[in-house]
Amino acid sequence: MTMSVAEAYQLFKKDYPDIKVGKSKFFEFRPPHVRTMNDMPHNVCVCPQHANFNFMLETLKKCVERLPTADLLTAITCDINSEKCMLEDDRSGCFNITDILPVNLVTDIAVVWKKWEKSESQYIPVSRQGTLNDLIQEIKKQTPIFKRHVFVKRQQSLHFENRKKNSTALEVVLQVDFAENFSILCQDEIQSAHWSHPQVTIFTGCAWSDAGNAKHSYIIMSNELNHDKYAVWAFMRKIIDDLKQKYPEMKKVSVFSDGCAAQFKNRYTLLNLCYSKSDWGVEVDWNFFASSHGKGAVDGIGATAKRQLWSAIMTRRADIVQSYDCYAYLKSKDLSGVNLYFLTSGDIDQHKEALQKRWSEFPAIPLIQKYHKFQAINSNMLLYSETSCNTSNKRLVFGAKLKYADIYSSDESGDSLPPLLSKRDDRPLPGTPGPSVTHENKENTKIQHGAFILVSVRNETRNHKVGYYRYLAICQEPPEEDNEVKVMYMKNISKGNEAKQFVTTPNDVSYVAMSEIIEVLPEPTVNTIGNRIYYEFNENVDVFEAG
């Protein structure tokens, strides 16, 4: 109930004055499944995108009685399971909110709706005021964002369930999360102790194999209260080491977690995927749930541990005053099916220097929060995509930082240069670089991370012979202040004289000037066969060597 029984009784008498019933009898008639207001649970961890969108629809529903709020996306989308309809901004063929509203709807009336907004360092619910037309336009503006969020949420949840059903002793599925730190209280504590409670970190995990029938729960406790990239590496290593003992033949671990940037979804934790074989002895790919939709078995594991500790403290069954006492007590309880470990801050710090050295030159991953699947291709290459299920929108990020001079020196002859792209023998070889993308029009060329470009590179041999190579490359970063762009060169593997199918050459990384960029090409089709990524263009790419 959203009110007290006494308040409900007063409303009943107001609406039905002719019905005579006493207060005690009215209280007695309350159905047993209707709980009183005091029993109402506190609904927390609500997704802000769902909450804000529902706030707007609730207000619109008051003005449009037959608005299909529950099935709105179905009503305005051709196919809610279609990646094209849900992810792409071009919504040709789909409707929008104005298409399903009554034609004679009065839109100049004043309305008020709620919204969660960030104020300084915290989110608070605020009231937004405007006309009904303002609300409709805001819904129309937020609909593509909400559709993308809903699609990612459903795809990631579906992929998670499918991976569990297909898990084996060779490929294990692992969900991980940090539980909220447990504050160590004391029964009969003095007033001064109330304001400074020690805490313990609780890292939880749940692993599935044998089509989800075999499940292993993990709790790692620590006195290190920083939930950062160093702690994640140490905790993951502990869990995977235990899984390797349980499954000696294990080859791969698929990790699922929420997208907290400080803990999991950052370039440092994801770079570790490239080193998973050397660090942990297995391949690891990382999948992220949609924002605010990462709840699962790990939350129950953490809640069970904290409940056990809370009960022990309140009933004085154990003296728990520091973080290790929490671990010792839970260890003595022998929690069924839970693998329990304790790592000190020293255990975590001992790997910091090596990890910092590893991460020092790794580039940022643009728009990292947009992507939800990360997989290592080799020791310096990551493949990432918007969802774990889609294969048409994949990108590569590279860890190797090589200058062009590190690959080619100016005194090398043209014949000694390793071929980055196949030579085009069916056309004349010009001795000039051709037209370039100038500084003035660079804003219109869409030169950004992931763009495919045709580059003209000058080469001078030891005989002072100057020639120009025409290479296909993929941009690794947006243009820098000095008008240089970091690129990864690609190699033509097409048959015959064609130049349509290419692969990346991870060690061929360079910086090129804007003046050396000839044109920006349309995105190719991306095909994955095993661990190899192939890029196929609809038309031949104009690549060749000139000399």
Image (tube, grey):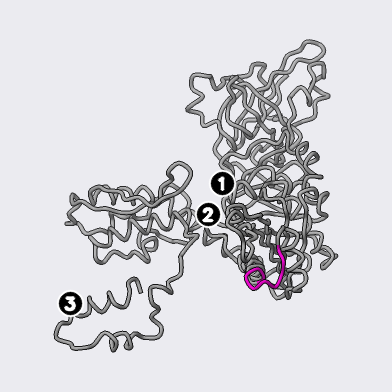
Q: Amino acid at mark 3?
A: Lys
Horizontal placement of 443 versus 288: left or right?
left
Q: Dots 1 and 2: beta carbons under 8 Å?
A: yes
Question: Circle 2 sits on which residue?
Answer: 291
Where residue 433 appears, as percent x and y from the top left, is: 63, 19
User: Label 3 neighbourhood size at 10 Å, few (<14), some (14-19), many (20+)?
Assistant: few
Q: Nearer the viewer, residue 170 or 509?
A: 170
Q: For mark 1, what is the residue?
A: 369
Q: Could you tell whether 9 is left or right of 390 in the image?
A: left
Marks 1/2: CA–CA distance: 9 Å
* Residue numbers of the magenta segment: 312-320
Q: Which residue is mark 3?
A: 14
Relative side of 118 to 514, left or right: left
Report the residue at 64% width, 40% height from top: 500
Kindly check if marks 3 and 1 are in contact, taking CB atoms under 8 A apart as contact. no
Alpha-carbon distance for marks 3 and 1? 53 Å
* Callout 3 secondary element: helix
Give the camera-side residue of 309 and 212: 309
Dot 2 surroundings within 10 Å: few (below 14), some, or many (20 or more)? some
* Residue 102 locus on image (x, y percent): 21, 59
For the residues marked 3 and 2, what is the alpha-carbon distance in whole angstroms? 45 Å
Which quadrant would the C terminus be assigned to in this image?
top right
Would you say residue 159 is visible in this rendering?
A: yes
Q: Earlier in the sequence, mark 3 or mark 2?
A: 3
Amino acid at circle 1: Gln
In reply to whether residue 313 is colored magenta, the answer given is: yes
466 vs 297: above or below: above
Name which residue type carries label 2.
Ser
